[in-house]
């Protein structure tokens, strides 16, 4: 189970435990509805991984994988 926490500046953070590790990351939004949607996506993807429907990449970023619906496993550079 994951939870949301708003910091003093209004940014939303998600907290969860997965695979024996604790995660706390910024969702990079000040919008509560958007944060709630991302929380749901993370929880859904954690369930899919637990059931074996999705597989975590061996050396990827777990948070990024869960929040991107399994599409990213490492940060992408921004094209300039």
Image (cartoon, rainbow, N blue to C red):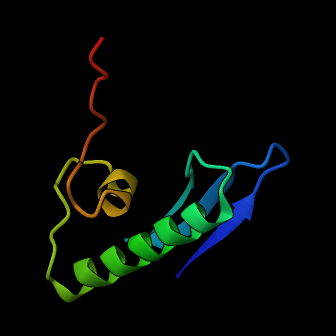
Q: Quadrant of the C terminus?
A: top left
Q: For the point 40% across and 56% down, which residue is it?
A: 63
On the image, the x and y values in percent for residue 47 come to 32, 84
* Residue at 22%, 61% in the rendered image: 70
Judge whether 62 appears above or below 20 on screen: above
* Left or right for 27, reference 60: right
Residue nearer the viewer, 16 or 40: 40
The residue under the point 65% across, 56% down is 31
Q: 69 above or below 77?
A: below
Q: Is residue 51 left or right of residue 62?
A: left
Q: Residue furthest top?
A: 80
> Total number of numbered labels?
0
23 up-or-down from 37: above or below: above
- Name the image quarter holding residue 2: bottom right
Measured along the vertical axis of the image, is residue 73 above or below residue 55? above
Residue 25 or residue 6, whichever sits in front: 6
x then y, percent, for residue 11: 70, 48
Q: Which of the 4 quarters of the picture holds residue 43?
A: bottom left
Could you tell whether 25 is left or right of 61 in the image? Answer: right
Residue 46 in percent (x, y) is at 34, 76
Q: Residue furthest bottom?
A: 51
- Residue at x 41%, y 70% (from the top left corner): 42
Q: Position of residue 71 (x, y in %)?
A: 20, 55
């Amino acid at each position: 189970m994951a939870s949301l926490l708003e910091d003093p500046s209004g940014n939303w953070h998600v907290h969860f435990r997965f695979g024996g590790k604790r995660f706390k990351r910024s969702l990079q939004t000040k919008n509560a509805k958007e944060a709630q949607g991302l929380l749901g996506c993370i929880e859904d993807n954690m369930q899919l991984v637990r059931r074996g429907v999705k597989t975590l990449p061996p050396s990827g970023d777990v948070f990024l994988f869960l929040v991107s619906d399994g599409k990213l496993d490492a940060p992408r550079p921004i094209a300039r």
